Image (cartoon, rainbow, N blue to C red):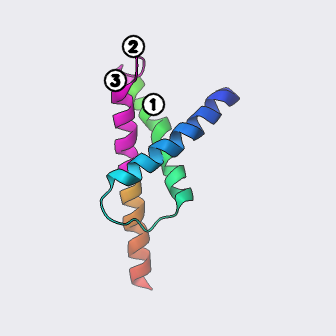
Amino acid sequence: MEISSLISAIFIGIIIGVLGRLAVPGRQRIGILWTIIVGIAAALLGTVIAEVLGVADTKGVDWIEWLIQIGLAAAGVAALDRSKGRGRLRR
């Protein structure tokens, strides 16, 4: 992976994380840093899944890949929010 690819992954991850967070209804109890980390992980994992499915390289915008990534980010944000919420209830 080249440095430009890594920078692109971080930038796309930020966008994916924010879109994933917007897809989850209600208020999330996680910070923006966790949102970005979840977004980067979702962007990388979503790209791998899209490549396996054969939808990563299409003509024009890769809408299916974006939807996979946003879905993963939304699931990650929701899971992290739930785990943060449980930790606060125990105290």
- Give the vertical position of 18 relative to 84 (above or below): above
Q: Main secondary structure of the magenta part?
A: helix
Is 36 included in the stretch rendered in magenta?
Answer: no
Please name the amino acid that badge 2 sits on.
Answer: Lys
Please name the amino acid that badge 3 sits on.
Answer: Leu
Crowd class of label 3 (few under 14; some 14 to 19; many from 20; radius 10 Å) = few
Q: Which residues are magenta?
A: 52-75
Total of numbered circles in the picture? 3
Residue tagged by mark 1?
47
Question: Where does the image place residue 16, in percent across and percent down from the top left?
Answer: 45, 43
Residue tagged by mark 3?
53
Say whether disc 1 or disc 3 marks the residue closer to the N-terminus: 1
Report the residue at 46% width, 48% height from top: 17
Quarter of the image that includes the C terminus = bottom left
**Mark 1, secondary structure of its residue:** helix
Image-quadrant location for residue 64? top left
Between the C-alphas of marks 1 and 3, the distance is 10 Å
Crowd class of label 2 (few under 14; some 14 to 19; many from 20; radius 10 Å) = few
Between the C-alphas of marks 1 and 2, the distance is 16 Å
Question: Where does the image place residue 2, in percent across and percent down from the top left?
Answer: 67, 26
Residue tagged by mark 2?
59
Q: Is residue 32 visible?
A: yes
Say whether disc 3 or disc 2 marks the residue closer to the N-terminus: 3
Is 61 included in the stretch rendered in magenta?
Answer: yes
Question: Where does the image place residue 50, in percent across and percent down from the top left?
Answer: 39, 27
